[in-house]
Amino acid sequence: MSANPYPLGLRLAGRRVVVVGGGAVATRRVPALLDADAEVLLVAPEVTPALRAHVDAGRLHWRPRRFAPDDLDGAWLVQVAVDDPLAAAAVSAVAAERRIFCVRADDRAAATAWTPAVTRHGPVTVAVLGGGDPRRAVGVRDAVRELLDAQAAAGVGPVAGVGVGPPVPVGAGDAVTPPAGPVGRVALVGAGPGDPELITVKGWRLLTEAEVVVADRLVPGLLLDELRPDVELVDAAKIPYGPSRTQEEINRILVDRALAGKVVVRLKGGDPYVFGRGGEELLACAAAGVPVTVVPGVTSAIAVPAAAGVPVTHRAVAHEFTVVSGHVAPDSPASLVRWEALAGLRGTLVVLMGLKNLAAITATLTRHGRDAATPVAVIQEGTTGAQRSLRSTLGAVAADVAGAGLRPPAIVVVGEVVDALTG
């Protein structure tokens, strides 16, 4: 194109944006639209599990069918995220007739708007257009981010206070002799509890180097928006009690892509080893001779209560805290948790993935001696803009959660620390 694009920041809060397509491209683009508080309409016969999670949470509206011209009624912007050129052209033609700017994933030259390469540092957003070359835009974007990181480490600039440090390699597969051929590598990266700025500096750096990203449902969506356009995104989202990829398939994807010479990042919410099956993935890679780097993440077990004003320990209140998975009911033969022993502890109990079995868990704890008046906090989608908190007691919390309509992901905190900063 001979003409330079006009840079503009769109204020989309409360304004309709239509996304056509429900695959990997839409999965990457929708989180930024939601972060802008846009009213998002998704039009696609099928959607990825990550997009379905947004639908189920009420963050966007989904029309499960092919595009129709009236889908653009009231729209301010349309993003075409399909790889069918004819279907994309049909959408952009309707957008042109209605004078609605249109972003096209399949053909930048045919689009009337481009999506820039973006990096975010608190209130600062840097968006780079590369003259139609996405790789150039990403390269400049990454250089700007490194400069901002350096300024923050020195305590100067617009994002001072964000610490950085030199990368320290962690080789989990060093003892394995790799097979002949151009073997890539896998990084198990913890993305933190939900706020995209809580990923570690090393984790973000590895994301910028990735050729393949295998991401879970709880990964901060804005991190996916910052991936290079040529990155293969594999949605390994595991919606609770819904459609999912088996762990064996995830292991196979990691190994196959690495053996093909790719740099693979397995991006997980929280920390890879805290109920994240990171150990299973490391063993699968090591067995295939694939080198693995493990990047710890900020675990939701501690960070989410903190974001809601609940310290898991507090002087003269709690000298211990226990983190337990509640995805298996206490009376199930498959449960590995000694709930009767937990009931006898005086410290803090943090339950992850326990909302479905909350009534059974609280009943078991009180039956084995934990006081029904013990304070309890339940925090949904902690550290994100959708965070909701509920304070109750052990005897009443299950009914209160049902009445308030709280849903996963949520953290349950049992103990006197719930009132430590409020009483």
Image (spheres, rainbow, N blue to C red):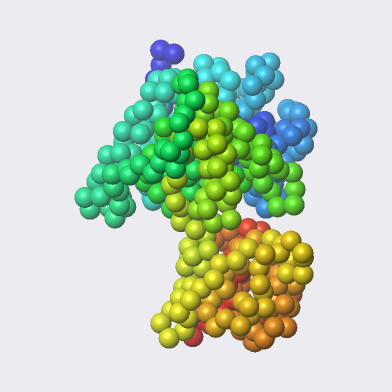
Pick whichever, 286 or 50, lies toward us: 286
Q: Is residue 152 left or right of residue 119?
A: left
- Give the total of numbered labels: 0
Report the residue that reaches farthest toward the top: 2
In the rendered view, would you say 74 is above or below 328? above
Relative horizontal placement of residue 21, taking residue 277 as reference (left or right) = right
Residue 394: x %, y % from top left = 66, 80
Residue 11 coordinates in the image, percent (x, y): 49, 43
**Residue 55 vs residue 73, the one in the foreground:** 55
Residue drawn at (32%, 43%) of the image: 167
**Looking at the image, can residue 41 be seen?**
no
What residue lies at 76% left-to-right and 32% top-to-bottom? 45
The relative height of residue 104 versus residue 15 in the rendered view (above or below) is above
Residue at 74% over, 44% down: 243
Rendering coords of residue 197 (x, y %) = 42, 50
Q: Quadrant of the N terminus?
A: top left
272 and 397: which is toward the camera: 272
Q: Is residue 1 above or below residue 15?
A: above
Q: Residue at x 56, y 18 (%)?
A: 107
Of residue 246 and residue 36, the one placed in the foreground of this image is: 246
Question: Would you identify the image quadrant in which residue 104 lies?
Answer: top right
Residue 188 visible to an observer of this rendering: yes
Image vertical order of residue 417 relative to residue 220, above or below = below
Residue 300, position as x, y percentages in the image: 52, 60
